């Protein structure tokens, strides 16, 4: 082998042997095989070599390159093995994997989504309205007289501006009827606020789901059929449902709906779950007066409305005895719904 190339090769192998990490190994690679590396520069000399020596010189170059490349690769593997071992030291790969606990949906979210799903199947679309309402949308337009007890300061949270925290989601009925044209078929889940004394069955913030159906021939059997179907989907096909005459200012006739249910560990009994009724023509009349198209003429349209307590539904579904559990965010309670 050409002497000069032999000494380049041995210097290169020493350099590679001395490399202690990937960085110095890379430096060694460049110093020998790079464009200006020792072996590359030696290779360039081939043109000055007498023709009869060219073949031998070329062979020397090739075998040096092969040896150096092999040494680089071997060293690279060795360094990688050392790095792998260091990364794994102190880790016991036989230990079981660490658990990553994930959260879960809140029971109120679960019951709300289930209710929405059932009602959407029947063609109800989602609607929305503000929680800070005015008296017109919360009471007046809902045919609720000024001296009605629900409007009392003892029962309702008023702001100095005269606005209030909506006491029910029925205000969304009004907002929807102001802005859309029959047929109207909407549901509106959301918060409602009352100045109730807080106890096991009352909170000052609770959740309702409002429903409204307005068209030309909506009848009481439509209301009954819709809500019976809904409650049986919710609580089982054999659930008994009862419509009990009641009074709401904005529906006539009006009913409270009870379902006969057996809460875990209790005897079966009738439990009130919703209020409902046929939209009072006076409600259509007052909204119609604000529209130019006469689309809510009480002589042309009829409708039904209902409002139910989602907290109540959740408590029934899971046998929750204290409504406060729904807002305390105690993980021991919440993780049961995971
Ligand atoms: N808004 C009534 C309540 O909060 C429920 C209801 C809604 C009744 C729609 C009739 C029609 O008690």
Image: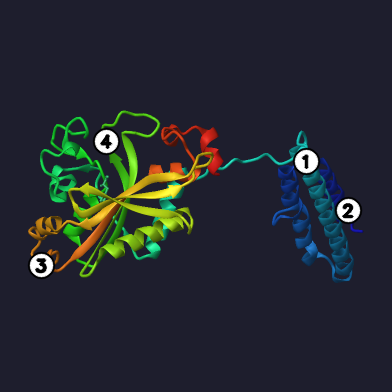
Secondary element at image label 1: loop
| Other-residue count near label 1 (Cα within 10 Å), few / some / many at <14 / 14–19 / ≥20 | few
The circle drawn on residue 6 is 2
All told, the count of numbered labels is 4
For the residue labelled by badge 2, is the local secondary structure a helix, a strand or a loop?
helix
Local secondary structure at mark 3: loop
Instruction: Check disc 3 and report the residue beneath it.
Output: 293
Mark pair 1, 4: CA separation = 57 Å
- Say if residue 260 shows up in the picture: yes
Observer-side mark, 2 or 4, equals: 4
Q: Position of residue 252 (x, y in %)?
A: 19, 55
Indicate the colouring scheme. rainbow
**Residue pointed to by mark 1:** 93
Q: Residue at x 43, y 37 (%)?
A: 326
Mark 3: C-beta under 8 Å from nearest atom of ligand 1:
no
Q: Earlier in the sequence, mark 1 or mark 4?
A: 1
Gap in Å between the C-alphas at discs 2 and 4? 95 Å
CB under 8 Å between callouts 1 and 2? no
Which of discs 1 and 4 lies nearer the camera? The answer is: 4
In this view, the residue in front, 19 or 86, is: 86
Q: Verify CB contact (< 8 Å) between mark 1 and mark 3.
A: no
When asked about the image quadrant of residue 151, the answer is top left
Whichever of labels 4 and 3 marks the residue nearer the N terminus, that label is 4
Nearer to the camera, 211 or 4 = 211
Kindly indicate the quadrant of the structure image that contains residue 41: bottom right
Which residue bears the numbered disc 4?
194
Tell me which corner region of the image, top left, top right, bottom left or bottom right, holds residue 204.
top left
Residue 174 vs residue 318, the one in the foreground: 318
């Amino acid at each position: 082998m050409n002497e000069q190339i032999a000494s380049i090769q041995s210097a290169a192998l020493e350099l590679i042997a001395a490399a202690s990490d990937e960085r110095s190994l890379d430096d060694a690679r460049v110093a020998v095989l790079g464009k200006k590396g020792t072996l590359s520069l030696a290779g360039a000399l081939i043109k000055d070599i007498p023709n009869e020596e060219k073949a031998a010189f070329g062979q020397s170059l090739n075998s040096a390159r092969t040896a150096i490349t092999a040494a680089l690769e071997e060293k690279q593997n060795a360094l990688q093995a050392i790095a792998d071992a260091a990364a794994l030291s102190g880790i016991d790969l036989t230990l079981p994997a660490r658990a990553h606990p994930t959260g879960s949906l809140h029971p109120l979210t679960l019951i709300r989504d289930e209710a929405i799903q059932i009602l959407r199947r029947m063609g109800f679309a989602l609607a929305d309205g503000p929680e800070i309402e005015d008296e017109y949308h919360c009471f007046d337009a809902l045919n609720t007289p000024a001296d009605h007890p629900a409007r009392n300061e003892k029962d309702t949270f008023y702001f100095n501006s005269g606005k209030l925290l909506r006491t029910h989601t029925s205000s969304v009925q009004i907002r929807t009827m102001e802005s859309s044209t029959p047929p109207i078929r909407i549901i509106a889940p959301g918060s409602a606020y009352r100045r109730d004394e807080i106890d096991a069955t009352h909170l000052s913030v609770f959740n309702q789901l409002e429903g409204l159906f307005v068209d030309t021939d909506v009848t009481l059997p439509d209301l009954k059929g819709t809500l019976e179907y809904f409650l049986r989907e919710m609580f089982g096909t054999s659930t008994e449902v009862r419509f009990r005459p009641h009074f709401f200012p904005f529906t006539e006739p009006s009913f409270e709906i009870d379902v006969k249910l057996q809460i875990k560990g209790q005897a079966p009994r009738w439990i009130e779950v919703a209020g409902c009724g046929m939209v009072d023509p006076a409600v259509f009349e007052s909204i119609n007066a604000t529209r130019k198209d006469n689309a809510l003429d009480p002589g042309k349209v009829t409708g039904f409305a209902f409002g139910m307590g989602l907290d109540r539904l959740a408590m029934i579904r899971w046998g929750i005895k204290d409504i406060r559990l729904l807002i305390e965010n105690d993980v021991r309670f919440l993780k049961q719904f995971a």
